[in-house]
Image: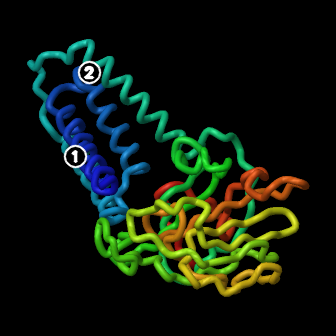
Amino acid sequence: MIIYCLLGITLVLALYSLYLVWKAGSRPLRATYTYLLLGLSLAVFLYLYGTWVYLSIYAGYVFGGLLLAVCAAYVLRKHDHAARPTPLWKRRSNLILSALFISLSILYFTGTTGTPDTVRLSLPFKSGKYYVLQGGKGLPTNVFHFSLRGAVYAMDIVQLNNYGGRANQIFSRNLHDYTIFGDTLYAPCDGQVARAYSDDPDNIPPNMNRGPKNTNQVLLETPGYYVFMGHLKKGSVVVKEGQYVKQGDPLGCVGNSGFSTEPHLHIQVHAKAAGTPWYQGKPLYILFNGKGYLLNEVIHTR
């Protein structure tokens, strides 16, 4: 199962990064600075990109605390000045990997799409704590959406439970184990309903064979842009095509229909362009209540 694999990779690499920092403390800095650099750069990369939410977001915070403790131990440890120097090939490989992790950590914040045009929306939920399972400013954080009809700023959002996880288990085939399943979705802006249906069944995780054309959805049209919200729960959509809705009006419930492995809300926004299908318009970066969110960030309702 890919979820277990991703979580396992995160945890193993996290322990390895701590080991590298600890190892660097056994000898003088001039002999082990490449190990220290690699350990710290890998740790920052994992803190930003790690799949902690599959266990709990608090696991990431614990990792951050352990890193600080290991760094403190590094400062306090006595160095073995008689130890052999690190081989040249190892120093070079450590520096190359460090440069990679540093670059990816910088790109986490900047993305590769330049300065995006933005759109201000209200968070389409009323209460709870939410999490960006997929999102960001294009590559490398939003790699899945990057090739999906130009949806470079699309977001997949899940809800967190009291333990900081998105479900009662790391992986469950029971839809009701996922905190966001059945959560009410509200209009994030004023607009006219251009498309609304919810006749398709919800997938049982991780099955998503029905594909993207079978996604229960609501598409809102405004004077300047379209807002698409997908993977809604079967039979939950309460608005009709042609209906005008105000910000905060209920639209339906979050489900797991279409091309989706687990319950979540998929949302993307495109600028309107005459004679162009909504999904081919220029993608817009979403600001919820005036704030932009990146991969693995927590969204608090107000």
Residue in view at x 48 percent, y 66 percent: 131
Residue identified by numbered label 2: 30
Residue extending furthest toward the right: 274
Q: Quick check: 246 left or right of 103? A: right
Name the residue that disc number 1 marks: 15
Is 225 on the left-hand or right-hand side of 205?
right
Q: Is residue 139 above or below residue 279?
A: above
- Disc 2: CA contacts within 10 A as few (<14), some (14-19) or many (>=20): few
Q: How many marks?
A: 2
Under circle 1, the secondary element is helix
Q: Position of residue 52 (x, y in %)?
A: 34, 58
Closest to the observer: 73 or 285?
285
Query: Is residue 172 among the parts visible in the rendering?
Result: yes
Separation of residues labelled 1 and 2 (CA atoms): 24 Å
Q: Residue at x 56, y 74 (%)?
A: 200
In the image, what residue occupies the spot 73% across and 55% down?
279
The spot of residue 187 in percent (x, y) is: 69, 78
Q: Residue 60 versus residue 54: which sits nearer the camera?
A: 54
Residue appearing at x 46%, y 61% in the figure: 208
- Location of the C terminus (image quadrant): bottom right
The secondary structure type at the circle numbered 2 is: helix
Q: Are marks 1 and 2 in contact (CB under 8 Å)?
A: no
Q: Quadrant of residue 174?
A: bottom left
**Residue found farthest to the top:** 88
Q: Position of residue 167 (x, y in %)?
A: 36, 73
Provide residue 276's location: percent of width, then percent of height. 84, 53
Q: Vertical placement of 96 versus 59: above or below? A: above
231, above or below 270, in the image: below
Q: Residues within 10 Å of mark 1 (few under 14, many from 20)?
A: some
Q: Nearer the viewer, residue 31 or 140?
A: 140
